[in-house]
Amino acid sequence: MSVRILALVGSLRAGSHNRQLAETAVKLAPAGADVALYEGLAEIPFYNEDIDVESSVPDAAAKLREAAAGADALLFFTPEYNGTIPAVLKNAIDWLSRPFGAGAIGGKPVVVVGTAFGQYGGVWAQDEARKAVGIAGGQVVEDIKLSIPGSVTRFADTHPADDAEVAAHLTEVLDRLHDLAGRPTAA
């Protein structure tokens, strides 16, 4: 049985370095793992309890929940916008947190990584994402981290997949997440 890891990217920009990093994760998936890059975060309306009604959840939000429910683990890639998490990623977390106490990420291992232009590689955004995911019910894996600073210059002429150091670190992240997600849970 293959471990299913759902990757969500907090940047909608076509040339996003975080998207490139996520695409690299798809290519570097360890044997026995399938990393699926989720498409469609831009179509999900902002979370609103008035439209989160069992019989009429917006289709885009229902698809996100279905994808997360079918995953064994989640891997978030986040840039840092004004020192925090991008709205599109926070919105996805909000939709995945409901229904309260039974959200699609409940109890699943979640790792947050990313790259940003600043000297710390987006650690503030990653910390904020971990906090939101934990409150939303995900099992945040605090000791698996990857923050790549200087994205604009580092990846100006090099795709993350062609950066040996980045590929090695990302492979380690994927191997560890795969191992965690593949473990049977205690009953």
Image: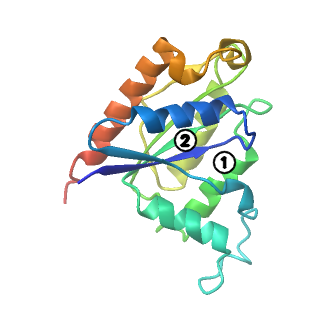
Task: Decide which of 149, 168 is in the foreground and name it.
Answer: 168
Q: Is residue 142 left or right of residue 22?
A: left
Task: Decide which of 113, 20 is in the foreground and name it.
Answer: 20
Residue drawn at x 54%, y 52% is 135
Provide residue 159's location: percent of width, then percent of height.
60, 21
- Residue position marked by numbered label 1 in the rendering: 89
Q: Residue furthest right?
A: 82
Provide residue 149's location: percent of width, then percent of height.
64, 16
Task: Decide which of 67, 132 is in the foreground and name it.
Answer: 67
- Residue position marked by numbered label 2 in the rendering: 76
Are the residues flagged by discs 2 and 1 in contact, CB closer than 8 Å? yes
Residue drawn at x 56%, y 61% is 96
For residue 154, which quarter of the picture? top right
Is residue 97 visible from the viewing direction of this image? no
Is residue 17 visible from the viewing direction of this image? yes
Name the quarter where the N terminus is drawn: bottom left
